[in-house]
Image (cartoon, rainbow, N blue to C red):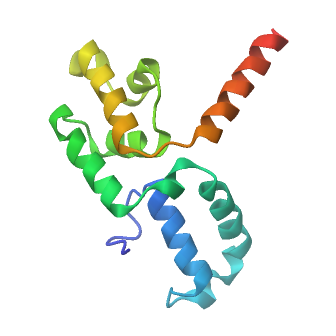
Amino acid sequence: MEVKKEKSAMLSNYEVLALLQDIQKGHNKQKKMHTNIATVSYEIIQHLENTACAKQSPEVISNFMKALEPYKLTKAEKLQFLNLRPRTAVEIQLIVEESEERLTEDQIYELLDLLGQHLPGDDTEQEQEEMEEEEIVDQE
C-alpha cells in the first residue's frame, strides 16, 4: 500500500494498521527513523488488530466506497463510516453533517444495511460495547 501525500492523506484504520505492520516488519526504507515510535506502533497495532478493520481488505474497502456513491457523502464522512462502522441511525446522523437536509430516513436505514453487508463486523467488539452500556445503566 502506498500513501501518495504523507502529510495530507486521510487514512482509514485499515490503512494505518497495514502501514504500521509494514514498518514493524521492516518493509519501510526509513526503518531507522521509526525506531523511536516502536512502542507506539506496537500499541496501535495491538488495538487495531482487535477491531473490525483487521478483517477489511482493499477489495472490501473499494466495494464499500462504490456502494456509498449514490449518497453524495464527503470523503471525510465515508472515512468515518469505514472507521466507526455506525450501527444506529443516530450514529449516522452524528457523522453526516446536516444529515436532516441531505438524507431521508429511508436512506439512513439503507446506509445501515450497506454497512452490515459490505463491512465485516466484529461481534466481540459489539458485545463489549453492549456490556459497557449495561454497566453504565446499572450504575445510574
Q: Work out which residue is located at the far top of the displayed protein and give it.
A: 140
Q: The C terminus is located in which quarter? A: top right
Please identify the quarter of the rendering in which residue 10 is found: bottom left
Residue at x 39% of width, y 35% of height: 116
Please identify the quarter of the rendering in which residue 43 is found: bottom right
Q: Which residue is at the front of the view, 107 or 98?
A: 107
Residue at x 31% of width, y 34% of height: 114
**Mark count:** 0
Q: Which residue is at the front of the view, 15 or 30?
A: 15
Q: Position of residue 83 (x, y in %)?
A: 46, 46
Is 89 situated above or below 64? above
Q: Position of residue 62 (x, y in %)?
A: 27, 55
Q: Work out which residue is located at the far left of the displayed protein and give it.
A: 70
Is 104 situated above or below 66? above
Is 106 situated above or below 14? above
Is 74 situated above or below 39? above
Q: Position of residue 5 (x, y in %)?
A: 34, 70
Left or right of 25 on screen, residue 95: left
Residue at x 66% of width, y 32% of height: 127
Left or right of 126 on screen, residue 72: left
Q: Work out which residue is located at the far right of the displayed protein and give it.
A: 139
Q: The N terminus is located in which quarter? A: bottom left
Left or right of 82 on screen, residue 38: right
Please identify the quarter of the rendering in which residue 80 is found: top left
Q: Which residue is at the front of the view, 124 or 99?
A: 124
Residue at x 28% of width, y 13% of height: 105
Q: Position of residue 94 (x, y in %)?
A: 43, 25
